[in-house]
Amino acid sequence: MQKLATVNLTIDGKRVGAKPGSTIWEAAKEAGIDVPVLCHDPRFEPVGVCRMCAVEVEGARVMAAACVRKVEEGMVVRTASEKVERCRRMLTELLMSEQPEISPKDATTGGDKLWALAERYGVEVRLPRGNSRPDDLSSPAIAVHHQACILCDRCIRACDEVQVNEVIGRTGKGYAARISFDLDNPMGKSTCVTCGECVAACPTGALVNKPVAGDLKAATKAVDSVCPYCGVGCAVTYHVDEAKNRVLWVDGRESPGNQERLCVKGRYGFDYALHPHRLTKPLIRIKYPRGPLSSEVETSHGHRRKPGGVVDYAEVMPAFREATWDEALDLVAKRLSEIRDRDGPGALAGFGSAKCTNEEAYLFQKLVRTAFGTNNVDHCTRLCHASSVAALLEMIGSGAVTTTYGDIVNADVALLTGTNATSNHPVAATFFKQAARSGTRLIVVDPRASGISRHAWRFCQIRSGTDVAFYNGMMHVIVEEGLVDEEYVKKHTTGFEAVKAKVKEYTPERAAAICGVPADVIREVAIAYGKAKAAVTYWGMGMSQHVHGTDNCRCIISLALMTGNIGKEGAGLHPLRGQNNVQGASDAGLIPMVFPDYQRVDNAEARAKFEGAWGRKLDPKPGLTVVEIVKGALEGRIKGMYMLGENPFLSDPNTNKVRKALSNLEFLVVQDIFLTETAEFADVVLPATSALEKDGTVTNTDRRVQVMRPALKPPGEARLDWQIICDIATRMGYPMRYRSAADVFDEMVPLTEAYRGLTHGNLGPTGKLYPCPEPEKSDGTVVMFGDGFPTADGRAKFVPADHTGADELPDKEYPFILVTGRVLEHWHTGVMTRRSMTLDAREPEAFVEVHPDDCARLGVDTGRMVTVSSRRGTISLKVRKGTHTQPGSVFIPFHFREAAANVLTTDKLDPFGKIPEFKFCAVKVVPA
Amino acid sequence: MIGETRVMLEHAGDPEQRTLAGYRKHGGYQALAKALREMKPEEVTEEVLKSGLRGRGGAGFPTGRKWKFVPKTTKRKYIAVNADESEPGTCKDRQIMENDPHQLIEGTLLAAYAIGAETCYIYVRGEYPHSIAALENALDEARGAGLVGRDIMGSGFSCDIWVHPGAGAYICGEETALLTSLEGNRGYPRLRPPFPAVEGLWKSPTVVNNVETLSCVTHILRRGAAWFSSLGCEGSTGTRLFCISGHVKNPGVYELECGKFTLRELLMDLAGGTPSGRPIKGVLPGGSSMPVLTEAELDVRFDLDSIAKAGSSLGSGAIMVFDDSVSAVDVALNISQFYSHESCGQCTPCREGSDWVRLMLDAVRRGEAKTKDVALLLDVLDRIEGNTICALAEAFCWPVRSFVRKFGAEFEAHVAGRASA
Ligand SMILES: Cc1cc2nc3c(=O)[nH]c(=O)nc-3n(C[C@H](O)[C@H](O)[C@H](O)COP(=O)(O)O)c2cc1C
Ligand code: SF4
Ligand code: SF4
Ligand code: SF4
Ligand code: FES
């Protein structure tokens, strides 16, 4: 058969050339002919069930569904004949006769496609029936109006093909057919994760958003921005009621990254910004001595608050009085300057936040380095990927990802390790799950069987803290089987021999004895990885948050290097970054040892450059990291702190130590949108703006720099964060004046080589992947390092690692391993998400996950209160029986203040990344 | 007098025929032995093609041609035997499965050999426990004797056969729904093209044939295509099973040669006419999915093509007769009730349309419809037909339309509220 470059056909008398393999609907669309569709959406596999697109094909007995039927040479198609139009009218009438009185879609977010067709055809319903299918209002965010459902299966495909959650199906046959969740459960009681993809897909009023923040019809403005939560950085559109200054609902937006998809946080977690707890006036503390205020942490009040929820304002507010901005800022500047002038710049420190924009991060570190005069500036990256970045910088000379999450479509093997992606990077996970569906083999390595392990080709459930042994075993096999890419190693790397010698010691049998994965499986996955044409590695904090976190990462980097899996499509290294701007905040220099773009502060040349740009002498000594700063405060060396959007009280390890440290400070200013647990210790609290109110850029895990745009006006007297920073710097004697966030960006870019050429203007609606030398023409760079590395010799460097194990092993007294982490619905310390109706409704309280075997041994079951204690403290919370954890391990998410997991964790650090071991400590569990 | 010509049911009365030994006594598995030893797979297909055999499941598609659609290059292929027998009035396949199951097994193996399939599934209607048991027993024996499984009769050809019970949905008799159901999913028909012979079970080429069709294959290979095509008439070769039911004196399953008599002769002579002696009002000659023939149309010659020319079809071989005591509106309503209940619910025209038609006919019956509603009913039927994924929609459009057209006066009488109860 000859292959045609184009297929020639006639549509409505017009001669049309179409791409081979395209459908009649696509060809017609190309030719500007509109064929109405109901069940079809180009994002999904066509199913051809609604028949609204049926057209006449000359010579055929029956009509063809244009959305499915492929074009053929010489085809003659009629899309608007009398017959076709009559069919459409009849179908519309049949469907309309079932609809409720008013369209639930048009009554909310609008755009009911069936009702639009009914209007177009002027359909009058001649035989009213109306099915009697009842509504299902059980989901916190989504209303299901079964009566309006036309069984187009779009929701089913959205859930199956796009989000790969496989929740929706059909039940009943014939006229009794309807959609159902799982085995016909109410939506709110099903395995639905409330991602809302089905709502976005539904053409009618059958699946609609519930009005959580006001009448959805009141939307007057649509604002394109970026989701404020995780590092996936999904492009969103906010629909805003300007008069009431409220966001009403959120849509996923088309972007090369998220491709319109969102998770429950992005789609339904926006209402935190509207919460009445928002800070609207500066606060100055009147109650001393300083200490925690809310009863959940201060048990001396003699009562505990009921579990759940957030800081009780009624308890906390009386310790403060409202102040004017001038008074508050003057006080901050005065107290911080006093400390600086009395005890030296090293007595001050600042915690920035990966929730800030690049502009804010840049200004914050600039303030600390100039106005404070110290490098004691850090942020939560220390707690998530510091070890990953340390290993990456050491071995390949760059801390950012070498390829995107979406590049997994080009991989035939993907290694997913230490990542609970379905909860923590849910939209990236949809791409992973999709890839698995279409044949990419996922090797999932994790001590916990989290959601993504269900999609694994091989799931390797290693013992906690044995990653190095497992990967050394894999590398042993790769060497032994001759699967090393010798040419790549020779051309692009140094130091292979050292790794080769090291992994020789780790036979699969020895590795198996340490990590618990059978030797055969280690062999099998190593061979699959080694033979893959392209293998990509994604990892999360299960790798990095260990005392051997840097070693863990060294291993997977070595694995990629020895098999030549960097620098080509579908291959590479991708630490999944946590916060929506953790990549950007790091790029902008919110790190104690480096200026923007990872230029070391102890490098004279770099320092000279920044001294020139900022007009101040800069400290040549790298500053202290997060945990070191807390330690410094505890020991009285750090006396004054500026905390911007961080809540270390809950997020940092060993809470009881953090409490003492914060109480010990001489002066603490907290800039935030809510009164956090940390703000309870503050002398001054400054009301800041949420992500929905600011403009600026954020850089996602893929290196995509995107513009956030304000959807709301800040509440009360709350002010833009960058302006607050400028005011404090100026008052401390270092004048900062900018006209806008764009202005700040324009100062930062020339100092940040990676961002060269970028401006707010040319980032466009979906941002750019840096490096992006030609922003006007291209989306930027997906795959990095095809031709060498940004190291001194242009080569990557192998670094061997040995299995050392965790710091605090279980023993008789503390027999369980505690793994901490997150859940899908909550963000870090819950300050935002626990104030979102939908998210809080889905996951309202703290829990500890215990394996059924251990439950039996302890005599506990789901719902039973237990106390969990480590050498550092005790918390009480409910048991959730589950098989995700291995026997002997328990899992606690760290979002919940009433049972703060970090009371238990150890603050032992990885020697290179200075990251604490959140993923391993010894605890005991006792029924309460 | 019209007589039966028994080929498939020749030994149906003999309980021994169900056993392997009994079946062998009457030449069982010799056709298979010969084919495996002496014939190339293509030659088996050629023989079936030459016999003129047409499918007995309903559509009457030439079996040899269907087999030829199967691509030669694909490695994995399947045979799916359609034993779902759910068309109202049809009860012929069970006669084969319960009385002479080995002829089906032999025919299935021959088909598998012809197209190169190593796995076959017999999808049996769930309400047929006796057929399922009979097939399982026969398969056990055949497997034990090396007739099913690895290296059959030392020929090097391996083929296994599995029995899969259905779960009660009419739609699973539709060939693509049968395949989705076999795959473990809801029994939904699939879009064509691709046709099952090219892309069927698990995306591999699959031939779907009716029980009776494959049983014929056994006899064609045993006695030759020429012998087979000498039976019956052109276009309807061989013998065929018919299930006569309704208002006749002698209902039952008959094995007949087509083309030798008229429909009237069949109903009056063989079936004995109506028990009440009242005139026949109408006949559904091929199951409930086919257009009705009226008394005035009964002189049509009884064969596939002649009945088709008369505007109906022999369909699944179920001949349902009713005398003039029966209301045409009631029959149409009854048919529409069946199909609105059995529609799988995928396609809008079928799901919504079948129920709409049912309600409309009910309104007609109760005298609540208006004259223009009958025209609207016909219009709706026209819009549904030819605009769905499978032929179930047509299966209610055809008969209902034929009733409205042929018994229009009765419908109008109901509409005007003048109908006698
Ligand atoms: C709604 C519907 C129901 C059907 N039910 C059956 C059935 O129960 N048994 C059967 O053999 N064919 C049935 N068919 C026909 C099959 O789709 C198919 O044509 C047949 O199995 C092919 O086999 P044949 O070529 O041997 O006749 C049905 C078709 C439709 C449209
Ligand atoms: S909200 Fe998401 S998970 Fe839930 S049913 Fe819809 S698509 Fe599936
Ligand atoms: S709920 Fe919406 S998307 Fe799902 S089948 Fe019904 S109409 Fe289609
Ligand atoms: S025509 Fe009816 S039975 Fe056939 S696929 Fe469509 S809805 Fe299902
Ligand atoms: S849009 Fe083509 S069948 Fe629904």
Image (cartoon, coloured by chain):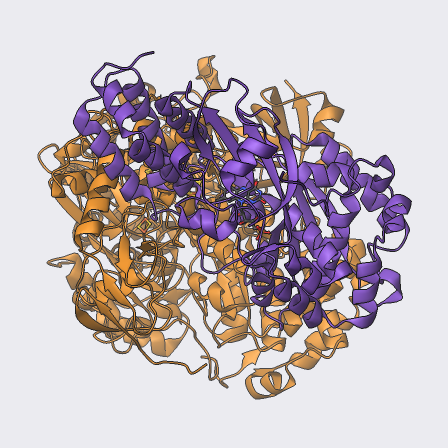
Chain colours: A orange, B purple
The location of residue B199, given as percent across then percent down, is 54, 60
Q: Residue at x 27, y 57 (%)?
A: A56
Task: Where is residue A291? Give x, y as percent.
Answer: 40, 28
Residue A426 in the image, given as x and y percentages of width and height? 44, 48
Q: Residue furthest left?
A: A243
Residue B279, placed above or below residue A265: above
Tell me if residue A524 can be seen: yes
In this rendering, would A594 be left or right of B376?
A: right
Q: Residue at x 68, y 33 (%)?
A: A851
Apparent side of residue A86 relative to residue B337 in the rendered image (left or right) = left
Quadrant housing the N terminus of chain B: top right
User: Which of the four quarters of the rendered structure image does ligand 4 lie in?
Assistant: top left
The residue positioned 17% from the left and 70% from the top of the image is: A14
Tell me: residue A545, above or below residue A113: below
Task: Locate the C terminus of chain B and report the quarter of the image it occupies.
Answer: top left
- Tally of marks: 0
Q: Nearer the viewer, residue B177 or A580?
A: B177
Q: Looking at the picture, how far across and down is residue A555, in whole percent?
A: 63, 66
